[in-house]
């Protein structure tokens, strides 16, 4: 095999390896995006729940002095 052919083969192997790495990284980014979206949805639900509870607590009876005063 000539030196030029060896270099071409080495470059093709490197390109194939890089393409596989890029595909794996792309899959990881897609998976992380799903996790981010799930987390965002949970945060939105918790925020809504917290605001609802906060609104309910505003309807509490006023604080008065205890009877022994």
Image: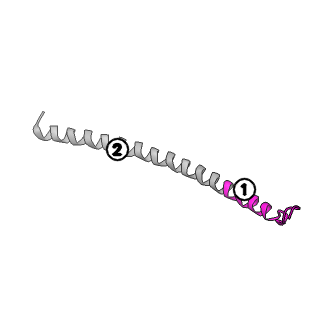
Hey, which quadrant is residue 68 in on the image?
bottom right
- Residue bearing the label numbered 1: 49
Q: Tell me what residue is drawn at x 41 percent, y 42 percent.
A: 24
From the viewer's side, name the closer residue of 17 and 57.
Answer: 57
Q: Which residues are magenta?
A: 46-69
Which disc is residue 28 wearing? none
Report x, y in % for residue 48: 70, 58
Residue 17 drawn at (x, y percent)? 31, 40
Quarter of the picture holding the N terminus: top left
Q: Element under label 2?
A: helix
At which x and y percent is residue 59?
A: 83, 64
Residue density around tag 2, few if under 14, some if 14–19, many if 20 or more, within 10 Å: few
Q: Is residue 51 magenta?
A: yes
Which residue is at 58% across, 52% downward? Answer: 37
Along the horizontal axis of the image, is 56 left or right of 25?
right
Foreground pick, 65 / 7: 65
The residue that label 2 is drawn on is 19
Residue 46 lies left or right of residue 52; in this view the side is left
Label 1 sits on a secondary structure element that is: helix
Q: CA distance from mark 1 to mark 2?
A: 45 Å
Position of residue 21 relative to residue 66, above or below, is above
Does 4 appear in magenta?
Answer: no
N-terminal-most mark, 1 or 2? 2
- 46 horizontally vs 28: left or right: right
Give the quadrant of the C terminus: bottom right
Task: Give the residue furthest to the top.
Answer: 1
x, y percentage for residue 33? 52, 50
Check whether the beta carbons of the residues at disc 1 and disc 2 lie within 8 A of each other: no
Numbered marks: total: 2
49 shown above or below 14: below
Q: Mark 1 vs mark 2: give the one in front.
A: 1
Q: Tell me if 69 is positioned left or right of 7 in this view.
A: right
């Amino acid at each position: 095999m000539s030196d030029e052919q060896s270099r071409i083969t080495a470059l093709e192997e490197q390109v194939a390896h890089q393409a596989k790495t890029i595909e794996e990284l792309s899959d990881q980014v897609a998976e992380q995006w799903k996790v981010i979206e799930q987390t965002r949805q949970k945060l939105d639900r918790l925020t809504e729940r917290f605001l609802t509870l906060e609104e309910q607590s505003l309807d509490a009876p006023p604080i008065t002095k205890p009877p022994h005063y």
